[in-house]
Image: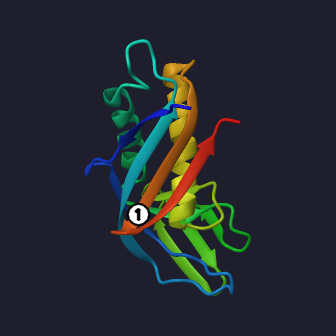
Amino acid sequence: MEQWSILIEKEYLKFSCAHFLIFPDGSKERLHGHNYQVVAEVDGTLSEHGLVIDFKMVKPIIKSICDHLDEHWLIPGEHRELRFHHRDDAHTEVTYRTCHYLAPTEEVIVLPINNTSAENFAAWIGRELFSRLQQSFGRLSVRRLRVGVSETSGQAGVYTYTDS
C-alpha cells in the first residue's frame, strides 16, 4: 500500500511561553518559559495534481496557531486543583495550592488541557490544526496528522490523529 504526506518543519513555526508543570505527586515546577518548536505531518490522499495539500496553504495556519500562543502564560484550565479567576480589573488570579499569582489577563491563555506538558501542547495544537484544515479545505482527506512540540532540541511531545 502506498501513502503520501507532507512534513512541515520551519524555523518560524515556534512560540515562546511561560508555564509550570504539575507533577503526579502534586509538586510543581517554578514558573518559567520555553521557546517551543512545532513540526507537523499531514498524511492524505494524493490528488490528481500530485499533492496531498499545498504547503503554502498549511504553513500560515500553523503559524497563526503559534502566534496565538506566543508570549503568553499558558494555564491548564482542566487541572483538578489549579484555579484561575479573570478579575474585573483586567487581571487574572491563578492559584495552585499555596502558590498565588496575578497577571494581566491579556497575557494569560487558559487552554482546555489538564497540564502544560509538551504532549498536551502537541494535542491542543494538533486538534486546532485539524479543525482549521477542515474549515479551510472542507473535503480534505486527512488519514493521519502528527504534531510535535519540542521544548528543547531532541525532546518533544507528539500527538497523532488517525482517521479510523
Residue 138 appears at what percent x and percent y? Answer: 56, 19
Horizontal side of residue 76 vs 107, given as left or right:
right
Identify which residue is drawn at 41% across, 25% down.
Answer: 53
Instruction: Report if residue 89 is visible in the image.
Output: no
Residue 15 appears at what percent x and percent y? Answer: 35, 56
With respect to residue 24, does 115 lie above or below? Answer: above
Residue 37 appears at what percent x and percent y? Answer: 35, 58
In the picture, which quadrant includes the C terminus? top right
With respect to residue 145, does 70 lie above or below? Answer: below
Residue 142 appears at what percent x and percent y? Answer: 56, 31
The residue to which callout 1 is attached is 150
Q: How many marks?
A: 1
Residue that lies at the very extreme toward the left in this rendered image: 11
Check the image and tell me how it is coloured: rainbow
Secondary structure under badge 1? Answer: strand
Horizontal side of residue 160 vs 19, given as left or right:
right
In the picture, which quadrant includes the N terminus? top right
Identify which residue is drawn at 54% across, 25% down.
Answer: 135
Instruction: Report if residue 129 is visible in the image.
Output: yes
Q: Looking at the image, which is closer to me, 49 or 145?
A: 49
Identify which residue is drawn at 52% across, 24% down.
Answer: 45
Q: Looking at the image, which is closer to me, 126 or 114?
A: 126
Residue that lies at the very extreme toward the right in this rendered image: 80
Residue that lies at the very extreme toward the front in this rendered image: 1
Identify which residue is drawn at 47% across, 83% down.
Answer: 30
With respect to residue 62, does 151 lie above or below? Answer: below
Residue that lies at the very extreme toward the top in this rendered image: 48
Amino acid type indicated by mark 1? Ser
Q: Crowding at label 1, few (<14), some or many (≥20) Cα neighbours within 10 Å?
A: many
Q: Looking at the image, which is closer to me, 76 or 34?
A: 34
